[in-house]
Amino acid sequence: MKHLGPITGQERLRDRAAHALRAALIAGELRPGTVHSAPALAAGFGISATPVREAMLDLTREGLVEPVRNKGFRVTEVSERDLDQFAEIRALIEVPTVGRVVRMASRGQLAALRPPAEEIVSAARAHDLIGYLEWDRRFHLGLLALSGNARLVETVGDLRKRSRLYGLTGLDERGELLPSAQEHLELLDLALAGDATGAQACMARHLGHVRSLWARSGEEPAARRSARGRRGAAPARTASER
């Protein structure tokens, strides 16, 4: 697994281990329901088990894994029903909030969101999945923060963590990541134009678009499925078949 190779560098080992584990989760290298021990993961990283165990505790607080007594940590599973409910709650919160933000925020406050919006697009073009998710998080939570409701931002941040899906690599390989990234610039342009109604519609479309894309994120690209078939391997299952 490419994201579980040796860890080197000056950054804290705990932080680097957590970063590598998140990358492996996003890429689908650590599958939902699988159990992993800190010593086994640490061996792959070429470091001691302590910073890996600390990193796994960080991921536990994010809802990405859960501890399993005497065994390690299990990658948490998110059902299609869970995802639908998370997406519905996000839409109920974010769509009206963005309309309110457009009406109350200054142009300067909104313009400050241009760099993260552009970074989302740059990350998508560079196939930087970790960077994409981080800038996406900063943009969405930064926009909501302009409402002045810290609890609202905290709630959406928690929903984002819990609704993450595996196989983002497949989304990138199908060329669907960049169009989703560019929707952030469209949303920001509408907000800067003072079009609250248009911004709300764009946010609703974006959230619905993202939900449908992530639902298919675990599917392999057609070329890869074909290659697997020629090798006699069973085709990948869709989200509905799992």
Image (tube, rainbow, N blue to C red):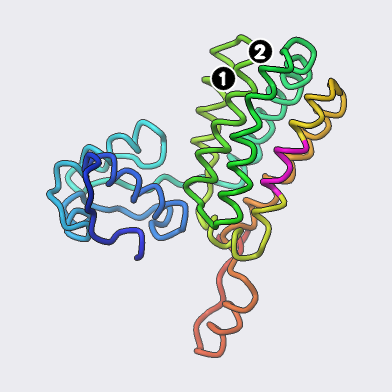
Neighbour tally class for label 1: few under 14, some 14-19, many 20 plus, Cα within 10 Å: many
Camera sees residue 32: yes
Query: Which mark, by number, is residue 153?
Result: 1
Amino acid at pointer 1: Val
At 54% across and 55% down in the image, what residue appears? 168
* Predominant SS along the magenta part: helix
Query: Magenta includes 216?
Result: no
Label 1, secondary structure: give it.
Answer: helix
Image quadrant in which the N terminus is located: bottom left
Horizontal and vertical percent position of residue 95 = 75, 25
Count the marks.
Answer: 2
Pointer 1 with pointer 2, Cβ within 8 A: yes
At 54% across and 57% down in the image, what residue appears? 127
Comparing labels 1 and 2, the label whose residue is closer to the camera: 2
Q: Tell me how far mark 1 sits from mark 2, CA to CA.
A: 9 Å
Query: Which mark, by number, is residue 223?
Result: none
Horizontal and vertical percent position of residue 68 = 26, 43
Of residue 85 and residue 8, the one placed in the foreground of this image is 8
Q: Which stretch is magenta?
A: 180-186
The residue beneath circle 2 is 147
